[in-house]
Image (cartoon, helix red, strand yellow):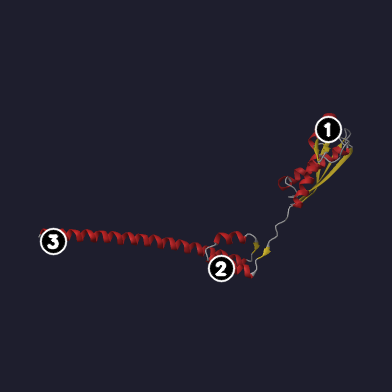
Amino acid sequence: MKSIKIHGKDYVEVKERVKYFRKNYKDYALTSDIIELTEDRCVIKSTVFDLNGRAISTGIAYEIKGSSHINKTSFIENCETSANGRALANLGIMIDDNIASADEVRTAIDVQENMKKPKVVKNKLSKDKFDAMKKAIKEGKKDIVKKKMLNYILTKKQETVLNGLLEENITTVTNIMEKLDNTIADYHDVELYEMQQAGMNKLKTRINKNK
């Protein structure tokens, strides 16, 4: 039976135990029952029955949603796999090295790695930092403020005030651009007027010379 090494030890995947079971215990049955199921955790019990319908081996597994990478999306399926692996191991299938399956060990390692990752703790936004953010928005540093806001827990009032200032700041920039466009347009109108006046003056000069 195939096995894989994890941290230098041999472990058998549950699928290998299932394949062996189906091939060598054709008249036996492997069933699984959900013992407990909530939004974030699952307990499943798997049972092996012999050809007379007598339970001869069981395995139980417990998984928490989000505790590992696979449990973020498939904690129920993973729980059943672990329970099946336990039941087959208790039947005596490939337990020379370890009863735990490779699937269980990988999940356990994944859980441990997640526990090692530092959790991001957000602090409440203090009055000083709140005032500093308002000042920064008025100075045109709205992108910096938006990023900073993600690092703090804001009250509803603080969030409303800051978002209002950010929107007001955007409006102000828009108004500035409109004014700039109008100024350029006015400049072009003045320039055109001056060119027209210069042309008229040249024409008058020529007419006076011809008299």
Instruction: Say which amino acid is labelled 2.
Output: Lys
Disc 2 to disc 3, C-alpha distance: 65 Å
Residue 34 in percent (x, y) is at 80, 46
Residue furthest left as drawn: 211
Mark number displayed over residue 21: 1
Q: Secondary structure at mark 3?
A: helix
Answer with left or right where residue 42 lies relative to residue 208. Answer: right
Which residue in the protein does label 3 denote?
A: 208
The answer to whether marks 1 and 3 mark residues whose Cβ atoms lie closer than 8 Å is no
Q: Is residue 1 left or right of residue 178?
A: right
Which amino acid, by three-letter code, is at mark 3?
Asn
Q: Earlier in the sequence, mark 2 or mark 3?
A: 2
Camera-nearest residue between 95 and 199: 199
Q: In the depicted view, which residue is nearer to us: 172 or 129?
A: 129
As drawn, 20 above or below 208: above
Instruction: Report the residue at 63% width, 70% height from top.
Output: 128
Mark closer to the chain start, 1 or 3: 1
Residue at point 83%, 32% (across, down): 21
Which residue shows up at 36% across the image and 60% down it?
Answer: 184
The quarter holding residue 54 reads top right
Amino acid type, residue under disc 1 in the picture:
Phe
Mark 3: give few (<14), some (14-19) or many (20+) Cα within 10 Å: few
| Circle 2 residue | 135
Image quarter where the C terminus lies is bottom left
Relative to 47, say whether 25 is above or below: above
**Tag 2 or tag 1, which sits nearer the N-term?**
1
The picture places residue 63, in percent across and down from the top left corner, at 78, 48
